[in-house]
Structure formats: structure tokens, C-alpha cells
Amino acid sequence: MAQSNGVQINVENLTHRYNSKCPLTFEALDMQSTPGESLVIIGRSGCGKSTLLHIIAGLLGGYKGTMQLNGQDVKDPSSKWVMMFQAPHLFPWMTVEQNVGTGLRFAGWSKDKIRSRVNEAIALVNMEEYADKNTQDLSGGQQQRVALARSLVMEPDMLLLDEPFSALDAFTRANLQKDVRAISKQIGFNLVMVTHDIDEAVIMADRALVMAGSPGKMVHDLKVDLPDPRDRTDPEVQRMRAHLMEIFEEAAGGTLVSTNV
Ligand SMILES: Nc1ncnc2c1ncn2[C@@H]1O[C@H](COP(=O)(O)OP(=O)(O)OP(=O)(O)O)[C@@H](O)[C@H]1O
Ligand SMILES: [Mg+2]
């Protein structure tokens, strides 16, 4: 799998509403992220997190303001920015290998090239022994690993994740969090992840952004400066968790505050 240079994300003065009868989703929203950074966005239900993710991925228009990746306006989706959702959305009648190769088949790749890239991605997510199994016979966590491999074969510069682990049990979830962060750092792509889970934010983030209000805005920008690999039982991780929880509970409008712990 080739190394990625990641992307510079630049959101400035972003205003959005779904249609003229809807209130503003967010107004004058600013957000930046540097190449290779892992950014986690948390905030209460309905403040616009998923909407923002869809705009960054080029899946949703109808906004005013600046939305640029590497200095270019984002107009359309691209195979270089890949979105993962809570449900893995696999084809249940296909094997793991076939599911992971779907995007490359659509792109017209040769069978040999697909096989080699698919095998690499399946190895990255530790699913080699399941490569020829049908995905309907896998657990929820294994299915999410397949969805992750299907994203990785596209060699993304940015992986966007909308609460991707929220349907999984705590143990499976913790393993996936650790692996997704490690893979993103190994390859160099950006992560932009939405979650409701403060633990997940602290384990996954280089920076955590707290969103609040209606219309939504960014109210806190926290640098999560912790060494890897991160362990929930580490006192430093617990201290950061308590700090982020405090910020989250206090988040109710106001201007953007940056803190380093
Ligand atoms: N397709 C749509 N048409 C109209 N309004 C919408 C649409 N999708 C979302 N909204 C509204 O926009 C606002 C933001 O929704 P969004 O899904 O981005 O929130 P969220 O922060 O992701 O919430 P959650 O944490 O519950 O997933 C909400 O008030 C929601 O009702
Ligand atoms: Mg959402």
C-alpha cells in the first residue's frame, strides 16, 4: 500500500441549510486540519456533525463559504476521500475478497492487480484467514474490518468515519480503534471521525473538536497530545478523558477555545 501525503482541510465561514424551510445547520463555521492529522468531532445529537462530514467528503452541496482540500474547492466525491458509516454496507453474498475488490473492479483494474492490492488491504486489517468467507458469516466487528479494507484499497488520503464502531461491543470496538489509528499513522492519511464516545475521541484523536448549538459551531479545539499506543488505563489518558468530558458538558455556544493539557 503506497504512503499517503494526507490532505490539508480548510473550512472557512461555512454556512449550510438543507432547504429554504429548514433552519441553518451551521453558520460561519471554521475548521482546519493538517496533512496526516487525526481529527475527532464530538457534539450533541443534531448539531450538524454528519452534515459537515458529508460536505467535507464532497457528498453534499448547498453551502456557502470555503471548503477546500489541498487548496482546491471540493465539488464532487473522490476515491481519495472515503467515508465509513456505522453499518458496513457489504454485499452479503460475496466473499471478503470480492467485497474488498469492488471499487477496483469498477475502476477497471486487471484481476492480478486487484488480487495483490486486495490481499495487502486484508492483511492490514488482520482478516487473512477469512478472505474466502462470505461476509454474511462474519461478526459485526469482522464486517467492519472488511469495510475498512474496502476503503484502504482505494489508497485514500482521507478516511471519514461517522460513528463507525457504535454498534460493536466494547472489546471489538477498542481493538478497531487502536488498529484504525495505527494504520492511518503507518500510511499517513487523515482521519476525520465523528463520535459520541469521549473514550473513543481520546484514543483516536490528535485533536478533538467540540461542536455545539443550533446552528452548530465549533466551541472547543483540544490538542490530544498523548503517546501511542494509547491505553485507557494509563493515568494520562484518563486525565485527558476527564478534561474532554468537562469541556463537552460545558459546551454551550461561545467562541472557540484552544487548550493543551
Ligand atoms: N436531509 C435532511 N433534510 C433536512 N434536515 C436535515 C437532513 N439531515 C439532517 N437534517 C437536520 O440537520 C441538523 C443536523 O443534522 P446532522 O445529521 O448533521 O446532525 P448530527 O450532529 O450528525 O446528529 P447525530 O449525532 O444525531 O447523528 C438536524 O437538525 C437534522 O434534523
Ligand atoms: Mg450524525
Image: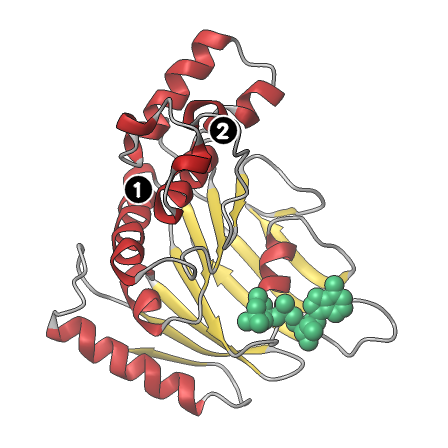
Residue beneath label 1, please? Answer: 183
Q: Which is nearer the eye, 22 or 70?
A: 22
Q: Residue at x 81, y 75 (%)?
A: 22
When the figure is inspected, residue 146 is found, relative to residue 28, above or below; the finding is above
Q: Which is nearer the eye, 222 or 214?
A: 214
* Residue 54 picture quarter: bottom right
Quarter of the image with the C terminus is bottom left
Label 1 Cα neighbours within 10 Å, binned few <14 / some 14-19 / many ≥20: some
In the rendered image, residue 42, in percent from the top left (x then y), is placed at 46, 72
Secondary structure, mark 1, is helix
Q: Which mark is residue 28?
A: none
Color scheme of the displayed model:
secondary structure
Label 2 Cα neighbours within 10 Å, binned few <14 / some 14-19 / many ≥20: many
Quarter of the image with the N terminus is top left
Tell which quarter ligand 1 is in. Answer: bottom right
When the figure is inspected, residue 130 is found, relative to residue 69, above or below; the finding is above
**Type of residue at label 2?**
Asn
Q: Is residue 249 at all visible to an observer of this figure?
A: yes
In the rendered image, residue 196, in percent from the top left (x then y), is placed at 44, 71
**Type of residue at label 1?**
Ile
Residue beneath label 2, please? Answer: 99
167 with respect to 85 (left or right): left
Give the residue furthest to the front: 137
Cβ of disc 2 within 8 Å of ligand 2? no
Q: Residue at x 42, y 62 (%)?
A: 166
Q: Which is nearer the eye, 227 or 233?
A: 233
Q: Which is in the foreground here, disc 2 or disc 1? A: 2
Secondary structure, mark 2, is helix
The CA span between labels 2 and 1 is 20 Å
